[in-house]
Amino acid sequence: MAVASSDIKYYLSGGATGAGNSDPAVSLGGVITTTLVGTNIFDNVTSGEATAGDVEYRCIFVKNTNATGTLYSAKAWIVTNTPSGDTEVKIALAGEGVSATTEIVAGEGSAPSGESFAVCANEGAGLSLGNLVASAYYGIWIQRTVTLGASAYSNDGFTLRVKGDTSA
């Protein structure tokens, strides 16, 4: 069965809360939840964060929810970075691999161990998730950097995309 784009879904991680987490602010690694990622995984950039500069992290999971199909050679990239000129989002694959629980970081300002973050601004520069069989998922870490002396900003979202090949 072919994997449709609607079969690729994004879920929060549980953080210290576990599988019942529904709060993006504590999506800091751990297990996959059943809560879909909303339109804004990061909070608004406050005046304090903007003045001082800030780096925050979130961990989400991308999942192939197709019942039988495999998404081959899947890639993840940032289609649209943040609208603010004072912030930037980078992504990294969770080092634990396919369908694994990721490390949990101590707080949103704590970086995961060993992950290498990149802008990945197009499909060619995307991160390779390999093949995602039916119901498989992969952890993706997201880093948002607010530059020192930035302006406060609301709804500073971005667009992440995952795409791959599928059988007919």
Image: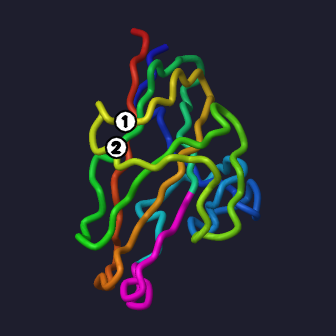
Report the front residue among 154 and 149: 149
Image quadrant where one finds the C terminus: top left
Residue at image x 34%, y 43%? 120
Mark 2 vs 1: CB contact within 8 A: yes
Figure check: 86 above or below 123:
below
Question: Which of the 4 image quadrants contains residue 86?
Answer: bottom left
Q: Which residue is mark 1?
A: 126
Q: Image check: 85 left or right of 76?
A: left
Q: Amino acid at mark 1?
A: Gly
Figure check: 119 above or below 55:
above
The kind of secondary structure element at disc 2 is: loop
The kind of secondary structure element at disc 1 is: loop
Q: Which residue is mark 2?
A: 120
Question: Where's residue 9, x and y in %?
Answer: 50, 41
Q: Image check: 21 left or right of 71?
A: right
Question: Which of the 4 image quadrants contains residue 123?
Answer: top left
Question: Which of the 4 image quadrants contains residue 66?
Answer: top right
- Neighbour class for label 2 at 10 Å: few (<14), some, many (≥20)? many
